Amino acid sequence: VYQRDSDSGELTEIQTYRDRGIASPTRLAMSDDGLFIYAASHNGNSVTVFARNANGTINEQQYLGDLPQEGLTAPRSARTSTISPDQNHVYVALTSINDAVIQHYQRDTITGELTYSNQIEPDSEYGRFTGLTVSQDGNNLYAAGNEGIVEIDLDDTGAMTVNRATPLDNPDS
């Protein structure tokens, strides 16, 4: 964790975090109130929830290791995560060499903690997802993969339904 001097722009390290599960964190998502950080860990196949203190330091609030991989044949690792605009849901993309799933977690807005809800497995032809974002109205989740973008409809509970996928015109593939 670094603190930035607002006058000079200089960064000063104020905390180093080395603990379980945080192996190769790939994406961080922060709650709108700035109180919680969600770290998707590629090699750790985990999501760690950090509580953020007033001075910017962090404490582990929750560790979700060995994320659910129900009905899947190849092991997956967490690649990216995003928080819904209403702050009630967190979505995590897990990928393997062949395919990907997107998991939905209910988020407690007071403690920041997550509870697994469900997952979907969009068409694997769109590759490994490296980016997720939720529309401002909270009605759609977009998953960017190396072969395309998948649009997912979200209902009021945060549950997901694949709407459509758009392949990328990738001359390098």
Image: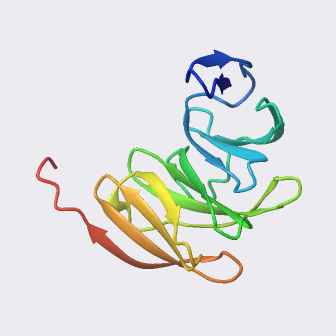
The quadrant of the rendering that contains the N terminus is top right
Q: From this viewpoint, which residue is outermost toward the left?
A: 171
Front one among 52 and 10: 10
The answer to whether residue 126 is above or below residue 19 is below
The color scheme shown is rainbow
Q: Nearer the viewer, residue 152 or 120?
A: 152
Looking at the picture, how far across and down is residue 23, in whole percent? 61, 28
Counting from the top left corner in percent of width and height, residue 76 is at: 53, 45
Residue depicted at x 58% and y 52%: 81
Q: Nearer the viewer, residue 31 or 140?
A: 31
Q: Is residue 156 left or right of residue 50?
A: left
Q: Residue at x 14, y 47 (%)?
A: 172
Identify the residue at the far front of this view: 7
Report the number of numbered marks: 0
96 vs 171, left or right, is right
Seen at 64% across and 23% down, the residue is: 5
Q: Quadrant of residue 165?
A: bottom left
State whether residue 55 is above or below residue 37.
above
Question: Horizontal placement of 26 versus 2: left or right?
Answer: left
User: Residue 112: x, y in percent?
Assistant: 81, 53
The residue under the point 73% across, 48% down is 34
Residue 82 locus on image (x, y percent): 59, 56
Q: Quadrant of residue 3?
A: top right
